[in-house]
Each structure stands twice: as C-alpha cells, then as structure tokens.
C-alpha cells in the first residue's frame, strides 16, 4: 500500500494545475485583427499569398486556437489555409457547401459559417478542440463577416449621399452664373475673368473625386467662390458677411459639409424674397469644438418641418441638410450633426458643431 505523505496533496495540485491563461489583451487584439481581415469577405484576394487578408485571418485563428490547421473557404474557391492541409479536408469542405451541415472525419472538422440564415462559407479545424469550440468559432467568424457587410453598406450609403450632393448642382444657378459672366466680357473683362476663376473653383470643388475629408479652409474657398458668383447674379439683393476665426481653419471636415448649407441659405433664404436678404457665415472655436453657423433672414420655416427635413422626410426638399447631417453623425458620433433654429418669418440658422480634432479624420 502506498505511503501518503504530507507533500502528496501539494504534488497532486501541481499535477493538475491549469496552464497559464492567455493574456486577455492579446486575445482581444487578435480578435480585432481577425475581424478586420475578414471585413472584405472570405474570397481570397489575388496576388501575394502573404498579403491575402483571409489567409492572414486563418493564421491568426490557428495561433489563437492552438490547432494544427485552419481553413477558411467561401462558397466557391479554394480555402485559405494556415498550417498543413489535413487529408480529406477538401471533401469535407465540399460536403458542407453541398449540405450546409457539419462534416468531420477523425480530428478534422468542417463547420458551416452562416450569416443571417444563409451559408456564407466553411471553417475547417484540424485538431481536437471539440464540437462546441468549433461551432462557437464558426459563429464568431460569421459575426465578423456580418459586421464587415454592415460597415461596407454604411460606407456605400455615405458615398451615395456624397454623390447625390455633387449631383445637386443647380442647372438654374449655373445658367445664371454663366450668363452673368458673359455680360461682363465686354463691359468689365477683369471682373469676367475673376468670375470665371470663381466658377472654375466652384465646379472643381463640387465634382472633385478626392478623399473623404478636407479642411475648413478648403470648404471656405469653395464657399467664397460660390458667394462671388451668387453676388454677381443677384446683385444688391444678396448681402454677405463672413467671420471665421483663424484657429479653426485647419479643422478637418467631411467633403462638401459646408458649401451645400450656404447654397441652401441663398436659394431658400434670399432668392425667395423679392427684396433679397443677407447670409452670415461664422466659425469659431469653443473649447475642443469648432462651431460653424450659417444664418439667413429669409422666410424661415415651421420648426416641425425643419425636424422632418433633418430626418429625411422631406422627399427631395432638404436633401443637402439631410445628407450633411447624416455624414457628420456617421463620422463624429450621434452627439454631433446639424441643429436648425428657425420659425416662420424669422429666418433660419443652421449650426454645425464638430470636434476640432478627431482620430482618423485627416484632410
């Protein structure tokens, strides 16, 4: 009969002590990196295999799970592999693609990746992890794919809204501007030349296919060009005052965030009045924020109607307000965006408040 000593329980505790837990920070970082790799879907990218984000995600999953092999496949092409490809894995992948159910042989298992009830791909694990871990991993990959689809949809919607703003150049304004420029060609050629340059800057800024952001200074150059043309067209009917603090000129803004608001003030606040009116544009720093206001003394509107316009319930009316507000909220968060101060017969004041510095927002 074995002799039990005092040290035996200690030895037994050492024998069954668990391996040190993985660093939670490292696990979260790896999970975030894998999700970023899968943002574009499971189809392998052409070119260098080392640069393929799907293959990179497979390598990271293999390291995180501690298995011999990981394969990620979409519904058509060859899987992206990390580790030595297990024997019979290709047949398992085809079986899951065909039946939509888990397939396994020995220590190799292929699980369906299901996004919103539809088969989106296959996860293959070579190692004894257990069915529950494999299923949870496949579900996690599915969630990463769904997040990627949602983000891509949001970006596509934002690009569509920007295209809509660019396409909203008023043919009526362009015709009037060109006609006005033409009227100065003989009588005041210097002014005609200046207005042609303003028109070129206005068009260039409105239709440019550039990055997502510009500076407040860049937006104001386009605003000044537009206002010069509008004053030439409307004459004494349009009075303009611009006051911008120099410290906010470098603030980065989404492209076409300000110019459409100024155009809106001229078209709906001044042109609708026979006697014309005034437009005031101001920008200043308030602590860590930049506050920009566009104010006109036009007919104004019912506050409920203004809220409906911002909510996108105005149909074609208020497209500029809706698009700018949505893009500001998408970039800076729901606490930002546009505020409309208005009443019937009291003019309209549109206030834009954005952070002076925002990570990832660079002109």
Image: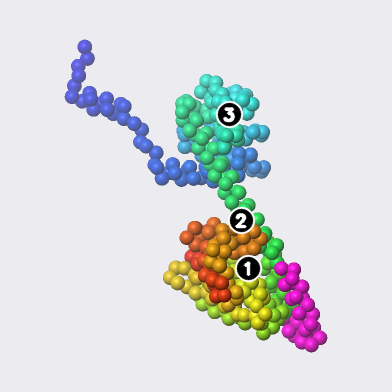
Give the colour scheme shown. rainbow
Foreground: 42 or 189?
Answer: 189
Q: Is residue 357 magenta?
A: no
Q: Is residue 180 magenta?
A: yes
Residue ID at (58%, 81%): 241
Up/down of 163 relative to 246, above or below: above
Q: x%, y% of residue 82?
A: 56, 34
On residue 85, the disc is 3
Which SS type dominates the magenta stretch?
Answer: helix
The quarter in which the N terminus is drawn is top left
| Label 3 or label 1, whichever comes before in sequence order | 3
Label 2, on which residue? 158
User: Which range of residues does the magenta coloring cover?
Assistant: 170-194
Left or right for 227, reference 101: right
Point out the residue furthest to the right here.
186
Q: x%, y% of residue 88?
A: 60, 23
Gap between marks 3 and 2 measured at Cα: 41 Å
Residue 72, picture quadrant? top right
Determine if residue 221 is in view.
no
Mark 2 residue crowding within 10 angstroms, few (<14) / some (14–19) / many (20+): some
Mark 3 residue crowding within 10 angstroms, few (<14) / some (14–19) / many (20+): some
Dot 1 and dot 2 residues touching (CB under 8 Å) = no
Label 1, on which residue? 260
């Amino acid at each position: 009969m074995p002799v039990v000593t005092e040290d035996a329980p200690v030895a037994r505790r050492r024998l069954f002590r668990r391996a040190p837990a993985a660093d939670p920070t490292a696990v979260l970082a790896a999970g975030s990196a894998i999700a970023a790799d899968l943002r574009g879907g499971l189809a392998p990218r052409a070119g260098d295999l080392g640069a393929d984000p799907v293959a990179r995600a497979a390598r990271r999953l293999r390291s995180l799970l501690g298995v011999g092999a990981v394969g990620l496949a979409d519904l058509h092409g060859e899987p992206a592999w990390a580790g030595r490809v297990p024997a019979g894995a290709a047949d398992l992948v085809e079986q899951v693609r065909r039946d939509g159910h888990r397939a396994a042989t020995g220590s190799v298992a292929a699980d369906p990746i299901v996004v919103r009830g539809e088969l989106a791909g296959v996860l293959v694990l070579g190692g004894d992890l257990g069915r529950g871990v494999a299923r949870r991993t496949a579900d996690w990959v599915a969630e990463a794919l769904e997040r990627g689809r949602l983000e891509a949809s949001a970006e596509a919607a934002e690009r569509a809204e920007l295209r809509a703003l660019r396409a909203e150049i008023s043919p009526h304004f362009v015709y009037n501007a060109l006609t006005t420029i033409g009227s100065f060609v003989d009588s005041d050629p210097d002014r005609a030349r200046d207005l042609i340059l303003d028109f070129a800057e206005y068009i260039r800024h409105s239709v440019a296919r550039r990055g997502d952001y510009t500076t407040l200074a860049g937006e104001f150059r386009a605003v000044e060009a537009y206002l010069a043309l509008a004053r030439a067209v409307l004459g004494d009917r349009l009075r303009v005052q611009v006051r911008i603090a120099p410290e906010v000129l470098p603030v980065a803004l989404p492209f076409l965030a300000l110019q459409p608001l100024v155009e809106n003030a001229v078209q709906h606040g001044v042109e609708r009045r026979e006697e014309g009116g005034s437009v005031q544009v101001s920008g200043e720093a308030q602590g860590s924020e930049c506050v920009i206001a566009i104010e006109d003394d036009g007919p104004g509107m019912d506050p409920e109607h203004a809220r409906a316009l911002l909510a996108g319930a105005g149909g074609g009316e208020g497209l500029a307000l809706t698009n700018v507000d949505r893009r500001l909220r998408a970039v800076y968060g729901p606490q930002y965006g546009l505020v409309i101060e208005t009443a019937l017969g009291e003019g309209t004041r549109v206030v834009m408040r954005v952070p002076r510095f925002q990570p990832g927002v660079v002109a």
